Image (cartoon, rainbow, N blue to C red):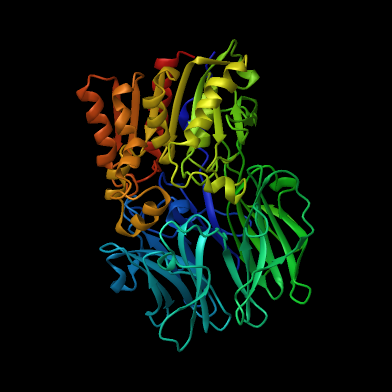
Amino acid sequence: MAANVRIESLLSARSFQDPQVVGSRVYFISNLSGHLSLYAMDRGGSVPEPILPPDVVLHNPRLVGGYPYYVFPKLGQILVMLDHHGDENYQPMLVPIEGGYPEPIFQELADHRVHMGEPDVKRNLVYLVAESRKEQMNYGYQADLRRRKLRKLGQSMWGSYPETASESHAKVVLTDGYTAGDVALYLWEKGASERRLVYGKPIEQRAEGEVVPPTGIHSCQFVAEDRALLFVTYQHDDAGGLGRLELASPSVVAAVPIRGTVHTGRGMLEGLEHLDGDRYAVTYSIDGVSWIYEGAYDGTANEMHLDRVVCGQGELANGVVDSHRYDKARKRWAISFATATAPTQLYLVEKDGKVHRQTSERVLGIPAEWLSSGEDASYTSFDGTRVSARMYRPAPALGFEGARPLVYYVHGGPQSQERPDFAWFSMPLIQFLTMNGFAVFVPNVRGSSGYGLSYMKQVDRDWGGKDRLDHVHAITEVLPKDPGIDVRRAAVTGRSYGGYMTLVLAAQHPDLWAAACDMFGPYDLVTFMERIPETWKPYFRVAVGDPEKDRAFLAERSPRTYIDQVRCPLLVVQGKNDPRVVERESRDVVEALRAKGKDIEYLMFEDEGHDVLKFPNRVRCYNAITEFFRKHLRP
């Protein structure tokens, strides 16, 4: 039987993200009002106080690209990155620390999409990268918030992203990125007229067809009195490790051993952060769950010694850190943490290891035994590749009997990972589907992050290739052997790249599906790349294909080429303001299938972008998807 549950009960658990501790105050992003905004409360808990007026809406912090906000206590201001209802044209705005109406700063960046990099709250400095909205060019800046002045550090069509700065800010590392893990490092020095190449081979210097092994360098930090860099790299370990580069002779990256990890399982090193002095944080994703360590870097021995687990054990285990920030003044952490069955909570982790939860969010009216924590469902694909996956089944307490209809969920990216994370769009939907009698299968096929750089790189210039075959193998060879699943009643769904793959699978393998739901997925790879922002086009030309040189290949990999073969009913979900997959792209799908008399429904949100964030819209979206599957899969 279906549980008597309204989606409002699941969505009653508000999100708490991006916490920052400033003295006795905790700042954070939440959808307390039904849309995302900025709040503050007292440490230990108090009634949250809005920092922004009710008509100001923040975007999904994970899509912002950099910090969505940062508090500058000495300045008495908060720098907030604001767009307009998901259009992602972020502009830096200043808000009084006690709250107020945002005022623009750096008007000269008004025709750019701006992202916030690392701040220095003592000096009121912050690093920005500005994407031109008129040409294929990005600019890296050092911004002085007190004097309201910008210093240009470099420019490039490939990024020029300020990675890190020396303590004196006399040196800044800038990164150009071509595809995932393929980067070049540049150094800007005070007094120099322009940045200079430090490590890597710029794409402009490569011969046609030349293959340069990706290094995956990121999270750079200056060490040895600014004479060397310490960073994450995949040159010595496909799952990631640390490396050191001497700036005086930057030809070889030396491996930096990491001592003291206690986790087990398969995953990747995600990041390196400098805390204070010789103290660093090292973060991992292991089988999809988060681990944060603290440790000391021994520059003489060139080793990282981890001596403390901040997240990964105890109360902060078996879940995902949505966001975290370190309070250097009091040596404590502010963490937003969620699991597959528990919404985001804010935690403070003190220097003595004590964990203090600041929030008590919960879903309303739903017993814990009705929620599905999922189970490992990893499989071996058609060519012997191991694919990590999870299966979420209806909880036994719900009383469903017999083989369950299947919803096959494809994550976006493609170079991302579906994780046990209630904060993300998918998990409330997955839980709602299981409570309505569906089993939900969530694979991380090749191209996903979290399983090594080489695994992630396999999707480059192969959208709709082996990634598609991983899915086909699962639905035709693996899942039919599960007695708890009825693959004759199967639907496929996904968002963004997952929406693209939904269309690919529904069109190229029409016999496998009884229904499909595409959420803002590319339909025609050529028009998709013609319609994205100018600064994104160079990356997609390299990572997916060149719309001019590779037009035939892109057509062969586009759902549009096979759309006549779609047999199952299709629901398309789209945000009007989406810059990544513009509304016209989804409307093309709808119009093409309607012209052929196909069964298609279109759900378009006027005030959303590449997500569905506002409470009324989320209720409508989750209900529409679930009712669509109930109608066609008959759970």
Where residue 476 appears, as percent x and y from the top left, is 53, 20
**Residue 11 seen:** no
Tag count in the figure? 0
Quarter of the image where one finds residue 563? top left
Q: Residue at x 29, y 19 (%)?
A: 599
Q: Nearer the viewer, residue 29 or 316?
A: 316
Q: Position of residue 228 (x, y in %)?
A: 63, 77
- Please say if 308 is above or below 163: above
Q: Quadrant of the N terminus?
A: top right
Can residue 597 be seen from the camera position used here? yes
Name the quadrant containing residue 513: top left
Q: Nearer the viewer, residue 489 or 256?
A: 256
Q: Looking at this view, name the residue that lies furthest to the left.
A: 595
> For residue 474, what is the image quadrant?
top right
Q: Locate residue 347 relative to residue 154 in the image: left or right.
A: right
Residue located at (27% from left, 66% from top):
111
Q: Does 210 sit above or below residue 634?
A: below
- Depth check, front residue: 190 or 318: 190
Is residue 230 positioned above or below 152 on the image? above
Residue extending furthest toward the bottom:
191
The image shows residue 458 at horizontal and vertical percentages of 52, 45
Q: Residue furthest top?
A: 402
Q: Position of residue 307 (x, y in %)?
A: 79, 62
Residue sitting at 59 percent across and 14 percent down? 400
Where 362 falls versus 51 (above or below)? above
Query: Residue at position x 46%, y 62% from top?
Result: 177
